Amino acid sequence: MERKKQTKSLGVLTGKLLIFGGVYSNYQALTKVKLIAEEYNIPTSNIICTGDIVAYCAQPEECVQGIKEWGIHSIAGNVEIQLREGLEDCGCNFESGTTCNILSNQWYPYAQKKLSSKSIEWMQELPDFISFAYANRKIHVVHGSIDETAEYIFKSSSWETKQKVFQQAKADVIIAGHCGLPFVDQFEDKTWLNPGVIGMPANDGTTDVWYVILDDLVGMLSHEFHRMPYDHQLSSQLMEINRLPQEYSKTLLSGVWDNCDILPEVETKEQGARIKL
């Protein structure tokens, strides 16, 4: 029987919010974003992860337990869903035979092997969506979309695609993950915001990763994208030590993705160009 999707309501939030996605088993990046939250004095009740805590890098168990012990909010990414269901692939919708598909057959079994039963049990509790009111706006957090957890929605994706999600969620703001690139897209009174991910660089030729700070000063919603440097060299070394795909360990050092299999033409042409947000 198919599991019914769950939405966690946080009620009304106030003050600064810190939002990030895609930890991707990168414990060094997770450690850094926790320090940033402390510097901003943002409580755990105001911190949200858009899913895919587990993926390419070397420390899946440490990352899951780190998120759990930190006590922040997170939704389930497609990787968490696949892991908790005991399925044999990451559920990323990679086309068969593509580089991403081939490499996922290396890192996904590694993650399965490294994760404890307690981590898998904790994943069972993760909601599919988070909703809350903030700065007089209704906000809905998804991983990919409402219908498809692993749907890739980019800035260049049509507004019609995004509009469907707004209508389904009955939301003013959609915060999404999965695609790995930070962006904001606005039309009329609707805002689609992807904070980017902290586990892998954003294909822009820098080793920085990304997060977003929301603020509700004078009752109005504002967002600010932030680059985040971290110990990417150690993350890469740990991938090499554990014989994980060199393509991804090298990406941590170069800031450029090994391939653009998942990217639309617009984003593919922007590979290696420093993102300005």
Image (spheres, rainbow, N blue to C red):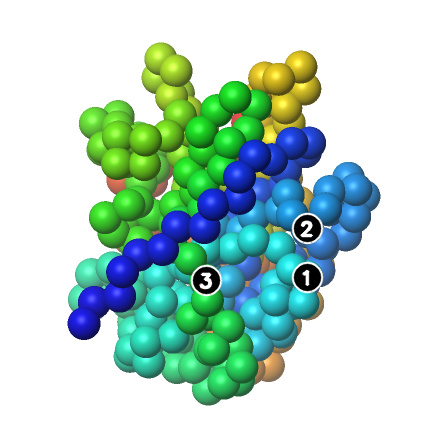
Which element is circle 3 on?
A: loop
Q: Residue at x 54, y 59 (%)?
A: 23
From the viewer's side, name the closer residue of 42 and 229.
42
Q: Residue at x 51, y 32 (%)?
A: 133
Q: Residue at x 28, y 45 (%)?
A: 146
Q: Is residue 210 visible?
A: no
Disc 1: which residue: 70
Q: Quadrant of residue 166?
A: top left
Q: Where does residue 257 sit, x and y in percent of width and height? A: 43, 53
Q: In the shown orientation, is residue 43 left or right of residue 8?
A: right
Q: In the shown orientation, is residue 150 left or right of residue 242?
A: left
Q: Amino acid at mark 2?
A: Thr
Q: Where does residue 163 sit, x and y in percent of width and height? A: 26, 28
Q: The N terminus is located in which quarter?
A: bottom left
Disc 3: which residue: 126
Whether tag 2 and tag 1 are in contact, CB under 8 A, the answer is yes
Label 3: few (<14), some or many (≥20) within 10 Å?
Answer: many
Q: Residue furthest front?
A: 11
Q: In the shown orientation, is residue 121 left or right of residue 35?
A: left
Q: Residue at x 51, y 62 (%)?
A: 53
Disc 2: which residue: 44
Is residue 235 depicted above or below 199 in this figure? Answer: below
Is residue 138 depicted above or below 206 in this figure? Answer: above
Q: Where does residue 170 sit, x and y in percent of width and height? A: 32, 31
Label 1: few (<14), some or many (≥20) within 10 Å?
Answer: few
